[in-house]
Image (spheres, rainbow, N blue to C red):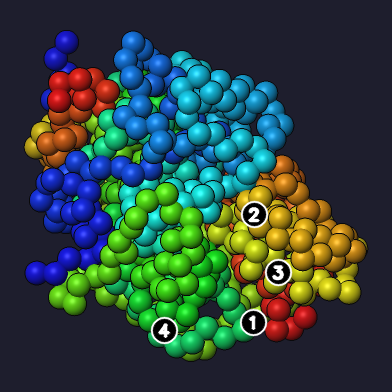
Amino acid sequence: MGQTVIEKIFSAHSKDEVKPGNIIWLDLDVRSARDFAGASVVMNLEKYYQNEENCEDKDKTVFTFDCVVPANNLGYAENQQTIRVFAREEGIRLFDSEWGIGSHILIEEGYSIPGSTVVGTDSHLNIMGCIGAFGQGMGDQDIAFGMKAGKTWFEVPPTMKVTIEGDLKAPCSAKDLTLAVIRKLTSKGALGKAIEFEGKAIDNLSLAGRITLSSMVTEMGGIVGFVPPNDEVISYCKKRARSDFTPYYAEEDAKYIEEVIVDISDLKPLIAKPFKPDNVVEVESLEKDNIHVESAFIGSCTNGRYEDMKIAVDMLKGKQVAENTVMKIVPATRTVLGDMIKNGDIQILFNARTVVSNPGCAGCASGQIGMTGKGEVQVSTGNRNFKGKQGSGLTYLCSPETVTASAIAGKIISPENL
Amino acid sequence: MKKPIILKGKAIVLRNDTNEPIDDIDTDMIFHNKYLHITDINEMGQYAFDNLDGWKDFAKKTEKGAILILGANFGSGSSRQQAVDCFTALGVQALIAKSYGAIYKRNAINAGMPLLLAAIIDNISDIVTGDEIEVNLETGLIKNITKKKDYQAMGMSKVQMDIYLAGNLFDYAKGM
């Protein structure tokens, strides 16, 4: 019987028999921790491995600061300092506050490559499915153990196939496709499963679009969601890779526990209402309610690539954000910010009266762009709108197109109707 | 000290005001991100569920040895270990849910917190907060001593049991 993508990746990283339900020991190519939970990882390493080598391979160990950068409260400042000192003394690579979102840095800097296994304290680390790698967010004890041992136990999940039928047509973009999948699967549809995405619309997704889709597999309850790497992705990763790699594709006769079809032929821009990411409706259906938007956020690991920024820039050219709305734009990484500076985008965003900040998680982690107050409506390109996650306001999740249209209109509006 | 396979304690059933089990309780409801900087486990208990409507006073209501009965997709969301550790801090003995967020499940297993799957939790809906229950971690048998009724959950897997008996993942790894 043929293997699914996760089974092939696991087989290449384990001596144990890989089949769904089996618990195997899995070799880890990259072990990372960020400013959130990273200090606890360090404490665990120091507590349990006091007088011995605490990292199996320092070149495979990475710290990133992305949640609250630079630290704006004492808790984060102290945690970051704990990590900083540890990384310096141990000779472990740290991407400090200027770099941006760790998961994106791992891809940009060639740590995560197709076919690799990557773990970290970021619950959206399964984003690595976007390049055909296995990624997994884990708690601080898990990651400390992974850094020490270079491997971890893992229960091989069954795989489900999600086939997208129809083409993705503007003004819909990868986020609308992603929300369409979440609407279909709900928050529990992929619980405990790996996903393989298939279909022409998937093949046509750029790396940025693949990042958007894979990043929200967490909100579908999934372990990881794989997008088969195409030439663009392989060549992007080859330029950056720290070692050779093999992309894995499912075998013809691979066994799936479930097959789901999501038809996007008639897709309209979608939005997830508070307080659940699977509370998905068409943006247009909210227009009659005249929902005033106080805060509009573009960024996060889900929509923080240059392509996402460019959507806002193009829509805002020669325009301004509505008078009673604040628009906050946060590139995922330094590289994205660098491209925005080089291409003159910052000038346009400045003229449009937006706040542009340094790279990082920002909106999703109550980081550099702050939080929402009680009753404050925020449209966000992030991935979670749980109650209290970004302050006490009401967060709606949607595409960069819908966020920008709503920021210009000052109310929730579909980009088609701006 | 040998860890017990059979646990006995008071059930606390997480239901909403219409007596439905609460699904999708995420890690921000269990342990809000405003407390993420807390690394001392002794500080964590007081904040357990303090962002979950109807359960904000959980830390005061619970007692040492409590066994939590939970809905589906419990602990979805972020990777924070504190969302498990806050229960350990309060002396919670075990968690029984319909299903768990994947990361949460790992965190609980690694920390040696007994966690059972009871897929058909609707059948145990007559357990109410305050019932005295007994849980066999190996077989998954749940006995409601108060109501004299039995229910079947899934027993713990081998790795899960090994880690639990050793204490936690680190202690388990020492014997590998």
**Of labels 4 and 1, the one closer to you:** 4
What is the CA distance from the residue labelled 4 to the residue labelled 3?
24 Å
Residue ID at (46%, 15%): B42
What is the CA distance from the residue labelled 3 to the residue labelled 1?
14 Å
Chain under disc 4:
A
Q: Picture coordinates of residue A269 (x, y %)?
A: 60, 78
Check disc 1 and give the amino acid type. Answer: Pro
Q: Describe the element under mark 4 as helix, strand or loop.
A: helix
Query: Which residue in the structure is indicated by mark 2?
Result: A335
Q: Earlier in the sequence, mark 2 or mark 1?
A: 1
What is the CA distance from the residue labelled 4 to the residue labelled 1?
18 Å
> Could you tell me which quadrant the C terminus of chain A lies in?
bottom right
Check disc 4 and give the amino acid type. Answer: Lys
Q: Quadrant of residue A79?
A: top right
Q: Picture coordinates of residue A109 (x, y %)?
A: 51, 50
Check disc 2 and give the amino acid type. Answer: Thr
Query: Which residue in the structure is indicated by mark 3?
Result: A310
